[in-house]
């Protein structure tokens, strides 16, 4: 069996997907080619169309096939409250939890000077412009609780303070159903620092 032919290339290319190893890629390739060629064709067409049409929203930088995404154009949402996240996947996660009725701003990463990612790459100039226009009353920082995520949140909170906009940070701590003995010390530290009265 020629592993270097088109089939081998397909398997290798499927390995680019996060969490997909060679065995999973092989199963996907064989399934699409043997049992679901119509689905494979639709997937290929949708992927090509998405690559050609999906870009960043002009207001929030989320991925969309429109100039302004459906969240930003939804007048039923509170446009004065903005949740700042690192990735478009974070937007989906927060939005599906149905606990937030405002809009978003997507950084597409976090501060990482070693990787050449500074404020300009994160679109902080666009965010600062929106904060200066006084259209935003509050920002909720929902960056990851990594060193880079914390540094990014700190910088954004300083920009918000300069623009006289309220900034808050989502709580990090013990997950629902979590047992203390299995929680790492960093998470416990956040949980104790973020405690609130009941």
Image: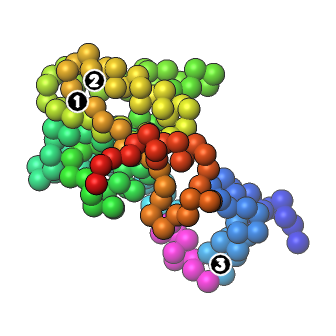
- Above/below status of 166 relative to 101: above
Crowdedness of circle 1 by 10 Å Cα count: few (<14), some, many (20+)?
A: some
Q: Which residue is at the far top? A: 162
Query: Which residue was labeled with disc 3?
Result: 31
Quarter of image, res 161: top left
The residue that mark 2 highlights is: 160
The disc label shown at residue 166, or none: 1
| In the image, farthest residue toward the right | 1
Residue 153 percent coordinates (x, y): 41, 30
- Sooner in the amino-acid sequence: mark 1 or mark 2: 2
Residue 144: x percent and y percent? 48, 41
Q: Which residue is drawn at 66% across and 72% down?
A: 28
Instruction: Locate the C terminus by quadrant.
Output: bottom left
Whether residue 153 can be seen here: yes
- Front residue of 95/189: it is 189
> Which residues, given as a range, are shown in magenta?
35-43
Q: Is the magenta stretch mostly helix, strand or loop?
A: helix
SS category of the residue bearing label 3: helix
For label 2, count other residues whose C-alpha is less than 10 Å away and answer few (under 14), some (14-19) or many (20+): many
Q: How many numbered circles are shown? A: 3
Q: What element carries label 1?
A: strand
Point 62% across, 59% down: residue: 181
Q: Nearer the viewer, mark 2 or mark 3?
A: 2
1 or 3: tag closer to the N-terminus: 3
Q: Is residue 11 left or right of residue 70?
A: right
Disc number lying in front (1 or 3): 1
Q: How crowded is mark 3: few (under 14 residues within 10 Å), some or many (20 or more)?
A: few
Q: Check residue 38 for magenta coloring.
A: yes
Dot 2 or dot 3: first in sequence order is: 3
């Amino acid at each position: 069996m020629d592993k270097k032919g088109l089939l081998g290339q397909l398997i290798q290319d499927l390995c680019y997907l996060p969490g997909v190893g060679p065995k999973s890629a092989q199963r996907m390739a064989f399934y699409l080619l043997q049992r679901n060629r119509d689905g494979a064709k639709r997937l290929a067409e949708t992927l090509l169309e998405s690559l050609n049409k999906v870009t960043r929203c002009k207001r929030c930088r989320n991925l969309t096939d429109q100039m302004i995404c459906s969240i930003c154009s939804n007048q039923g949402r509170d446009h004065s409250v903005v949740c700042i996240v690192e990735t478009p996947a974070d937007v989906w996660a927060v939005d599906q939890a149905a606990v937030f009725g405002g809009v978003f701003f997507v950084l597409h990463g976090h501060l990482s000077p070693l990787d050449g990612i500074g404020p300009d790459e994160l679109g902080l100039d666009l965010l600062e412009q929106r904060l200066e226009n006084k259209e935003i009353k509050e920002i909720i920082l929902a960056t990851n609780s990594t060193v880079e995520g914390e540094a990014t949140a700190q910088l954004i909170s300083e920009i918000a303070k300069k623009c006289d906009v309220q900034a808050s940070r989502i709580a990090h701590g013990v997950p629902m159903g979590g047992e203390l003995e299995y929680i790492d010390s960093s998470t416990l530290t956040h949980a104790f620092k973020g405690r609130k009265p009941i």
